[in-house]
């Protein structure tokens, strides 16, 4: 069974930054698009951003460019989400999902229900004073 494991969440003050990590077990991320989702308390899960196997980024939130920036390091079998200028409304459980699409120029991971080849369990991000 393919697995993803997120890490890097925690408590951060408004205006701060965090970098979340998404690591793969039992497969290599090279041939997989990776999407990031979040679910705030009492709200539906929503798509945050997505990075294709060729590194093309799609952002789904209505935020300034670069506030949420995914990246990938295939050599380390890791995908990251750098979050800048965090706000209390960014508080949520953040999770990643993978879909196998070798040589993909455009990531299509967006549906919070999937299905995808792998999901992570999520990592909590809390933005508060």
Image (cartoon, grey):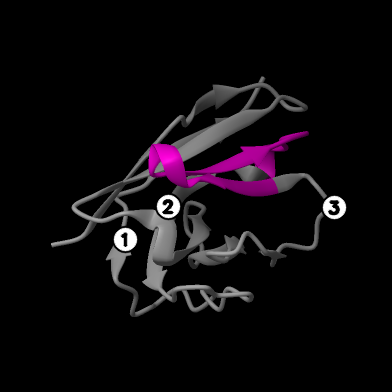
Give the mark nearer the N terminus: 2 vs 1.
Answer: 2
Residue 97 in the image: x percent, y percent?
Answer: 40, 62
| Foreground residue among 42 and 116 | 116
**Residue at the image point whose x is 69% and y is 67% from the top:** 60
Residue 106 sits in quarter: bottom right
Q: Position of residue 92 (x, y in %)?
A: 51, 46
Q: Residue at x 61, y 29 (%)?
A: 18
Q: Which stretch did the figure color magenta?
A: 69-89
* Left or right for 95, reference 49: left
* Residue 83 left/right relative to 45: right
Would you call the spot at circle 3 few (<14 residues within 10 Å), some (14-19), or many (20 or more)?
few
Image mark for residue 65: 3
Is the Cβ of the residue at disc 2 closer than 8 Å to that at disc 1?
Answer: yes
Query: Looking at the rendering, in which quadrant would you find the N terminus?
Result: bottom left
Q: Earlier in the sequence, mark 3 or mark 2?
A: 3
- Which residue does the numbered mark 1 point to in the structure image? 119
Where does the image place residue 15, in percent across and percent down from the top left?
A: 78, 27
Q: Mark 1: give few (<14), some (14-19) or many (20+) Cα within 10 Å.
A: many
Q: From the image, tell me which residue sits under label 2.
A: 95
């Amino acid at each position: 069974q393919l697995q993803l494991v997120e890490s890097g969440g925690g408590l951060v003050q408004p205006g701060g930054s965090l970098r979340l990590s998404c690591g793969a077990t039992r497969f290599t991320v090279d041939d997989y698009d990776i999407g990031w989702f979040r679910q705030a308390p009492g709200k539906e899960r929503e798509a945050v951003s997505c990075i294709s196997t060729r590194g093309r980024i799609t952002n789904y939130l209505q935020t300034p460019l670069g506030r949420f920036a995914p990246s990938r390091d295939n050599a380390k079998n890791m995908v990251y989400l750098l979050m800048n200028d965090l706000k209390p409304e960014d508080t949520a459980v953040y999770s990643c999902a993978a879909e196998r699409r070798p040589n993909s120029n455009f990531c299509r991971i967006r549906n919070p229900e999937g299905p995808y080849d792998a999901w992570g369990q999520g990592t909590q991000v809390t933005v508060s004073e």
